[in-house]
Protein backbone atom coordinates (compact mmCIF):
# COMPACT_ATOMS: atom_id res chain seq x y z
CA UNK A 1 0.00 0.00 0.00
CA UNK A 2 1.14 3.53 -0.72
CA UNK A 3 1.20 4.71 2.90
CA UNK A 4 3.89 2.18 3.77
CA UNK A 5 6.06 3.26 0.85
CA UNK A 6 6.12 6.95 1.68
CA UNK A 7 6.83 6.30 5.36
CA UNK A 8 10.12 4.69 4.36
CA UNK A 9 11.23 7.74 2.40
CA UNK A 10 10.51 10.16 5.23
CA UNK A 11 13.05 8.44 7.51
CA UNK A 12 15.93 9.70 5.42
CA UNK A 13 17.32 12.92 6.83
CA UNK A 14 15.69 15.81 5.03
CA UNK A 15 16.44 19.46 5.48
CA UNK A 16 13.58 21.83 6.18
CA UNK A 17 13.59 22.99 2.54
CA UNK A 18 13.72 19.42 1.18
CA UNK A 19 10.78 18.41 3.36
CA UNK A 20 8.81 21.40 2.07
CA UNK A 21 9.72 20.57 -1.55
CA UNK A 22 8.50 17.00 -1.02
CA UNK A 23 5.25 18.37 0.44
CA UNK A 24 4.81 20.55 -2.66
CA UNK A 25 5.52 17.56 -4.91
CA UNK A 26 2.92 15.50 -3.07
CA UNK A 27 0.41 18.33 -3.43
CA UNK A 28 1.04 18.36 -7.19
CA UNK A 29 0.06 14.70 -7.19
CA UNK A 30 -3.05 15.51 -5.12
CA UNK A 31 -3.90 18.23 -7.63
CA UNK A 32 -3.58 15.85 -10.60
CA UNK A 33 -5.57 13.10 -8.90
CA UNK A 34 -8.33 15.51 -7.92
CA UNK A 35 -8.65 17.49 -11.16
CA UNK A 36 -7.77 14.83 -13.73
CA UNK A 37 -8.08 11.28 -12.40
CA UNK A 38 -11.24 11.88 -10.38
CA UNK A 39 -12.85 13.73 -13.28
CA UNK A 40 -12.50 10.74 -15.59
CA UNK A 41 -12.62 7.90 -13.07
CA UNK A 42 -15.22 8.65 -10.43
CA UNK A 43 -14.41 5.83 -8.02
CA UNK A 44 -13.90 5.49 -4.30
CA UNK A 45 -10.41 4.13 -5.00
CA UNK A 46 -9.43 7.49 -6.52
CA UNK A 47 -10.98 9.35 -3.56
CA UNK A 48 -8.92 7.16 -1.24
CA UNK A 49 -5.76 7.80 -3.29
CA UNK A 50 -6.33 11.54 -3.08
CA UNK A 51 -6.65 11.30 0.71
CA UNK A 52 -3.49 9.15 0.94
CA UNK A 53 -1.52 11.77 -0.97
CA UNK A 54 -2.95 14.50 1.27
CA UNK A 55 -1.72 12.53 4.29
CA UNK A 56 1.72 12.33 2.74
CA UNK A 57 1.74 16.06 1.96
CA UNK A 58 0.71 16.99 5.51
CA UNK A 59 3.27 14.57 6.92
CA UNK A 60 6.03 16.39 5.03
CA UNK A 61 4.63 19.73 6.25
CA UNK A 62 4.80 18.50 9.84
CA UNK A 63 8.35 17.30 9.23
CA UNK A 64 9.20 20.74 7.88
CA UNK A 65 7.86 22.73 10.85
CA UNK A 66 9.49 20.30 13.29
CA UNK A 67 12.84 20.73 11.50
CA UNK A 68 12.42 24.48 11.92
CA UNK A 69 11.66 24.00 15.64
CA UNK A 70 14.72 21.76 15.96
CA UNK A 71 16.92 24.41 14.31
CA UNK A 72 15.62 26.96 16.83
CA UNK A 73 16.37 24.57 19.70
CA UNK A 74 12.71 24.18 20.70
CA UNK A 75 12.71 20.44 19.90
CA UNK A 76 15.57 18.03 20.63
CA UNK A 77 14.41 15.00 18.70
CA UNK A 78 11.87 14.47 15.90
CA UNK A 79 10.05 11.15 16.33
CA UNK A 80 9.83 8.71 13.41
CA UNK A 81 6.33 7.57 14.37
CA UNK A 82 3.63 9.61 12.61
CA UNK A 83 1.33 9.64 15.67
CA UNK A 84 4.09 10.86 17.99
CA UNK A 85 5.13 13.42 15.40
CA UNK A 86 1.55 14.75 15.21
CA UNK A 87 1.37 14.99 19.01
CA UNK A 88 4.69 16.86 19.11
CA UNK A 89 3.50 19.34 16.46
CA UNK A 90 0.34 19.98 18.52
CA UNK A 91 2.43 20.48 21.64
CA UNK A 92 5.05 22.80 20.07
CA UNK A 93 2.62 24.78 17.89
CA UNK A 94 -0.40 24.70 20.22
CA UNK A 95 -0.54 28.51 20.06
CA UNK A 96 -1.08 28.41 16.27
CA UNK A 97 -4.64 27.25 15.61
CA UNK A 98 -4.12 26.73 11.87
CA UNK A 99 -1.38 24.18 12.49
CA UNK A 100 -3.30 22.40 15.27
CA UNK A 101 -6.36 22.24 12.99
CA UNK A 102 -4.19 20.79 10.21
CA UNK A 103 -2.90 18.06 12.53
CA UNK A 104 -6.46 17.19 13.59
CA UNK A 105 -7.42 17.08 9.90
CA UNK A 106 -4.40 14.83 9.23
CA UNK A 107 -5.53 12.45 11.97
CA UNK A 108 -9.07 12.37 10.52
CA UNK A 109 -7.70 11.53 7.05
CA UNK A 110 -5.62 8.69 8.49
CA UNK A 111 -8.71 7.28 10.23
CA UNK A 112 -10.75 7.54 7.02
CA UNK A 113 -8.14 5.79 4.90
CA UNK A 114 -7.74 2.94 7.40
CA UNK A 115 -11.43 2.46 8.21
CA UNK A 116 -14.00 0.08 6.84
CA UNK A 117 -15.93 1.78 4.07
CA UNK A 118 -18.65 1.27 1.50
CA UNK A 119 -18.93 2.67 -2.02
CA UNK A 120 -21.95 4.45 -3.43
CA UNK A 121 -22.72 5.79 -6.90
CA UNK A 122 -19.34 4.98 -8.41
CA UNK A 123 -18.73 6.33 -11.93
CA UNK A 124 -21.21 9.15 -11.26
CA UNK A 125 -20.93 12.75 -10.07
CA UNK A 126 -22.06 11.86 -6.56
CA UNK A 127 -19.59 9.04 -5.94
CA UNK A 128 -19.37 8.64 -2.16
CA UNK A 129 -17.11 6.80 0.25
CA UNK A 130 -18.96 6.07 3.48
CA UNK A 131 -16.49 5.24 6.25
CA UNK A 132 -17.10 4.12 9.81
CA UNK A 133 -14.54 5.57 12.23
CA UNK A 134 -14.27 6.00 16.02
CA UNK A 135 -17.16 4.56 18.01
CA UNK A 136 -19.25 3.90 14.92
CA UNK A 137 -19.19 7.50 13.69
CA UNK A 138 -20.11 7.52 10.00
CA UNK A 139 -18.32 9.95 7.68
CA UNK A 140 -19.29 10.41 4.05
CA UNK A 141 -16.69 11.67 1.62
CA UNK A 142 -17.91 12.80 -1.78
CA UNK A 143 -16.34 15.07 -4.40
CA UNK A 144 -17.56 18.25 -2.68
CA UNK A 145 -16.15 17.22 0.70
CA UNK A 146 -12.93 16.09 -0.98
CA UNK A 147 -12.67 19.59 -2.48
CA UNK A 148 -12.88 21.03 1.06
CA UNK A 149 -10.09 18.64 2.11
CA UNK A 150 -8.08 19.73 -0.95
CA UNK A 151 -8.51 23.40 0.03
CA UNK A 152 -7.43 22.68 3.64
CA UNK A 153 -4.29 20.93 2.42
CA UNK A 154 -3.50 23.78 0.03
CA UNK A 155 -4.01 26.31 2.84
CA UNK A 156 -1.63 24.38 5.09
CA UNK A 157 1.06 24.53 2.40
CA UNK A 158 0.65 28.30 2.33
CA UNK A 159 0.90 28.52 6.12
CA UNK A 160 4.06 26.39 6.18
CA UNK A 161 5.59 28.36 3.28
CA UNK A 162 4.91 31.63 5.13
CA UNK A 163 6.45 30.19 8.30
CA UNK A 164 9.62 29.09 6.52
CA UNK A 165 10.17 32.26 4.52
CA UNK A 166 9.24 34.53 7.44
CA UNK A 167 11.90 32.74 9.49
CA UNK A 168 14.51 32.93 6.73
CA UNK A 169 13.97 36.68 6.33
CA UNK A 170 13.98 37.31 10.08
CA UNK A 171 16.93 35.01 10.82
Image (spheres, helix red, strand yellow):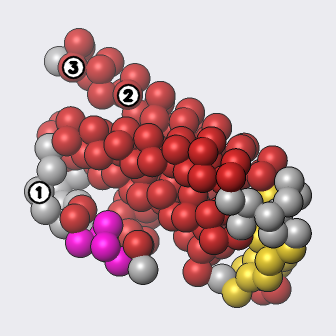
Specify the farthest residue to the front. Answer: 40
Residue 60 percent location from the top left of the image: 34, 51
Which mark is first along the chain, 3 or 2? 2
Nearer to the camera, 36 or 93: 36
Q: Quadrant of residue 93?
A: top left
Dot placed on the residue nearer the N-terminal end, 2 or 1: 1
The residue identified by callout 2 is: 161
- Magenta-highlighted residues: 4-8
Q: Quadrant of the N terminus?
A: bottom left
Residue 20 relative to residue 150: left or right: left
Q: Position of residue 159 (x, y in %)?
A: 47, 30
Q: CA distance from mark 2 to mark 1?
A: 20 Å
Q: Main secondary structure of the magenta part?
A: helix
Q: Earlier in the sequence, mark 3 or mark 1?
A: 1
| Label 3 element class | helix
150 and 126: which is toward the camera:
126
Q: Is residue 33 depicted above or below 11 in this figure?
A: above
State which quadrant residue 4 falls in: bottom left
Residue 89 image position (x, y, % from top left): 40, 53
Kindly indicate whether the residue at mark 3 contacts the one at mark 2 (C-beta within 8 angstroms).
no
- Residue 19: say if magenta: no
Q: Look at mark 3 in the image and give the residue it sits on.
A: 168
Residue 132 pos. (x, y %): 77, 82
- Which of discs 3 and 1 lies nearer the camera? The answer is 1
The residue shown at (77%, 52%) is 143
Q: Residues within 10 Å of mark 1 (few under 14, many from 20)?
A: few
Q: Is residue 107 visible?
A: no
Helix, strand or loop under label 2: helix
Number of the label disc, if any, that sits on residue 13: 1
Foreground tag (2 vs 3): 2
What count of labels does the image hold?
A: 3
Amino acid sequence: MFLNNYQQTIYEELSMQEAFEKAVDEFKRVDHLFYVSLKYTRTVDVIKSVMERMISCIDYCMECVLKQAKEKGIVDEIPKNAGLKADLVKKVFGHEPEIVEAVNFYQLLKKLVRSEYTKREEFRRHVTMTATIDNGEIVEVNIDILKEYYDKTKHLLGVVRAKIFQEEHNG
